[in-house]
Image (spheres, rainbow, N blue to C red):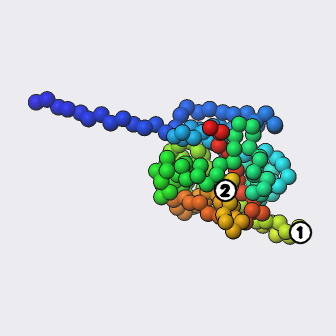
Amino acid sequence: MTRFFLVFPILMLTACSQSFTDPRDGKSYGVVQIGSQTWMAENLDYETDGSTCPEGDSRNCEKYGRLYTWEAAQNICPEGWLLPDSLDFAKLMEQVGGPSQTGDALKASDGWFKKGNGSDAFGFKALPAGYRGAVYEGEGGAYDGIGGYAYFWSASETLDGLAYYLFLDFSSKAAGLNAFGKGDFRSVRCIKKP
């Protein structure tokens, strides 16, 4: 009896580990290829006006990167890299299995509380840096969400003046694009210019 085996091609969406050194401050970042996109595999940690460390603690910058206002995020990525727009994030979600699986696929395999870790199937290593609320006339600016939530600014705005961000939650395998005020401080993941 002759046996036949079907061989299906496997689409590899991740490439070998790479790194990039930011010439502005000498910090090195992991880099990952997901489909046709090249992403930093760590949150940006470049100090500038309009940025802060999660929970206001410099030790958290080492782990989670910095949090930025939307305005500060617009031109914070190093030369050759960009702040992704909402279409870049939509493409990323599609390439890792769609919005219902994006959270699991992109979240780091440790560092999320209440067993909210992801599979980190693509090496994106999303960590829950949380956010800081907007500061108005020296008031407000409370920190929240470290350990449970990741928010990545996009370059895209809504018609009513809010800004889109990719949201990952410890309690869900899904992810989505939401919009909020530009004065909040959120994480930045840079994407390589095409």
Q: Nearer the viewer, mark 2 or mark 1?
A: 2
Tell me the residue that label 2 is attached to: 156
When asked about the image quadrant of residue 144, the answer is: bottom right
Q: Is residue 186 visible?
A: yes
Q: How packed is label 2: few (under 14 Cα within 10 Å), some, or many (20 or more)?
A: some
Q: Where is residue 138 shown, x and y percent of the image?
A: 89, 67
Q: Residues within 10 Å of mark 1 (few under 14, many from 20)?
A: few
Measuring from the top left, give residue 113's x and y in whole percent: 60, 59
Tag 1: residue type? Glu
* Residue extending furthest toward the left: 1
Label of residue 176 in the image: none
Residue visible at 26% across and 35% down in the picture: 6
Residue at screen point 70% across, 65% down: 162
* Residue 135 on image: x %, y %: 83, 66
Q: Identify the residue shown where x is 71% and y is 36%.
A: 80
Report the residue marked by disc 1.
137
Task: Classify 169 as above or below 30.
Answer: below
| 77 is higher (above) or lower (below) than 93 | above
Left or right, 72 with reference to 103: right
Which part of the image, by quadrant, shows the N terminus? top left
| Mark closest to the chain's N terminus, 2 or 1 | 1
Image coordinates for residue 68, horizontal then vertical, percent? 76, 54
The answer to whether 124 appears left or right of 78 in the picture is: left
Quadrant where the C terminus is found in the figure: top right
Whether residue 62 can be seen here: no
Horizontal relation, residue 56 to residue 122: left or right: right
Q: Nearer the viewer, residue 65 or 83?
A: 83
Residue type (three-letter) at the residue carrying disc 2? Ser
The residue tagged with tag 1: helix, strand or loop?
Answer: loop
- In the image, is residue 43 above or below residue 178? above
Q: Residue furthest right?
A: 137
